[in-house]
Image: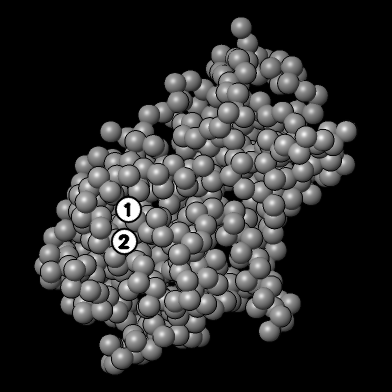
Amino acid sequence: MAASAPISKMIYVGPFVHSRSLTELEIGENGAIGVDENGIIRFVERDFHEGFEKLMAYVEENKDEWVHAKVVKIEGNGFFFPGFIDTHVHAPQHPNTGLFGKTTLLDWLKKYTFPMESSFSSLPRAHRVYQNFVSRTLSHGTTTCSYFATIHVPATNALADICLKRGQRAFVGRVCMNSDLSPEYYRDESVESSVRDSKASIDYIRSIDPNGEIVKPIVTPRFSPSCTPDCLSAMGKLAQETDTHIQTHISENKGEIALVQELFPSSKSYADVYDTHGLLTPKTILAHAVHLSPQERKIILARKSKISHCPASNTAITSGCAPIRELLNEGHTIGLGTDISGGFHPSILENVRQAIWVSRHLAITTNDSAKLSTEEALYLATRGGAAVVGLEEKVGGFEVGKEWDAQMIQLGEVKQEGNEDGIFEEGPVDVFGWESWAERVEKWVYSGDDRNTVAVWVRGRLVHNTSRYTGAEGTAAP
């Protein structure tokens, strides 16, 4: 069954921050956001500078249906921020996070990835890893993930079950791979079995969440070298027949691109391989896109396919620096992905930083126009990611009608006498009190981590909290 809705209306009181546009953050220093029993935002008030009691009087006078709502109020240096959206992540690779050594992409697959993923034929092992990873990503404020699973139907279905139970939005895909590039011990037996097993997972996921409110299936050909031409075509047809999203990789690594040219000699490019097999659609998520040619960019834009930028992974495996500024200028829809375990960290906030660093490294060899700002990187982590997975009308910001996917961020406060005992229970971000709210957000972006994320909600349901979250403060009126 779908994740349960909150049992009562809620009013979230305190500062809130979200992207108004690609280049502009809105910081509501004295906000109040009303969320109904179904997790839908029903009002957003921005100017209650006269305090909590004034807000309660306002609610009692003007919003009769909210007088008995429960209230969550932020104290100190806290603020509400939209939940992060991870547009590309390999859940079964979680145990390998941080293990990439001196390998490049294709070597890394053979040494680390395929052995780990193949072990998910053991359902207890899959449960252990997936339960831990969903909890881990939620703890970092990630409310939506687009997950690659493995070729195993039971384990893939288990991931969907876990996401639904925990309340994390997820696109869950059984990985398709039937070519000789994959080892004999870990590949689909045939095109027919790949279609059959993928359809089985699609049907199962839709049976446990028929309206796709929390979990949705996604067709997942690993990448073109891992699939035969017939398999790619079959996956494109399956996605069309089942009206399903598609996720795969593209132009991550120069060696990979050369392999694609070798395996598909009649194709004009890597993007053309997907296009001619029916896999470039408005519901397609293409991970990496580091080395796209101008013509490939035009094809992707014309097909309205989306891009997942995975900066930490691209650096870790030395794949290259994706020219995100150029792609944004051309009109591409882009979000961020952790790409665990090519990426070394399950946090989208970490990848916000990495996206900025990658753009600055690129600027060193090109020009300053390649740089991404803090505001732009946060947009990619929220509204951009929402558009990549087709949820831009539901999540990514705080507007009336959107669903309450949010995280409560709490920053530290430096005492007048300092921290003489050397204990920092409030996380790594120190606020002295003279910083503006914009500066506090900047400090969080560049220094924060999961210790600053004290509570997380999806569709109004509390799905993660720490001991620093005190919960509802009471009701708006007796």
Q: How crowded is mark 2: few (under 14 residues within 10 Å), some or many (20 or more)?
A: some
Residue 383 percent across, percent down from the top left: 55, 54
Q: Is residue 399 left or right of residue 253?
A: right
When asked about the image quadrant of residue 141, the answer is top right
| Label 1 element class | strand
Q: Do the residues labelled 2 and 1 touch (CB within 8 Å)?
A: no
Q: Is residue 119 left or right of residue 289?
A: left
Mark 2 vs mark 1, CA separation in Å: 18 Å
| Label 2 element class | helix
Question: In this picture, is 69 found above or below 233?
Answer: above
Q: Residue 59 carries which label?
A: none
Q: Which of 338 and 244 is in front in this view?
A: 338
Q: Which amino acid does label 2 sit on?
A: Met
Residue that badge 1 annotates:
172
Which residue is rendered at x = 55% and y = 67% of the image? 311
Q: Where is the C terminus found, in terms of image quarters? A: top right
Mark nearer the N terminus (2 vs 1)? 2
Q: In this view, does 443 lie to the left or right of 344?
A: right
Mark in the foreground, 2 or 1: 2
Instruction: Pick out the residue farthest to the front.
Output: 421
Residue 351 percent across, percent down from the top left: 57, 60
Which residue is rendered at x = 57% and y = 76% of the image? 321
Residue that badge 2 annotates:
116
Q: Nearer the viewer, residue 65 or 381?
A: 381
Which residue is rendered at x = 69% and y = 37% of the image? 426
Question: In this picture, is 474 found above or below 88?
Answer: above
Q: Nearer the viewer, residue 199 or 162?
A: 162
Which residue is rendered at x = 20% and y = 55% of the image? 121
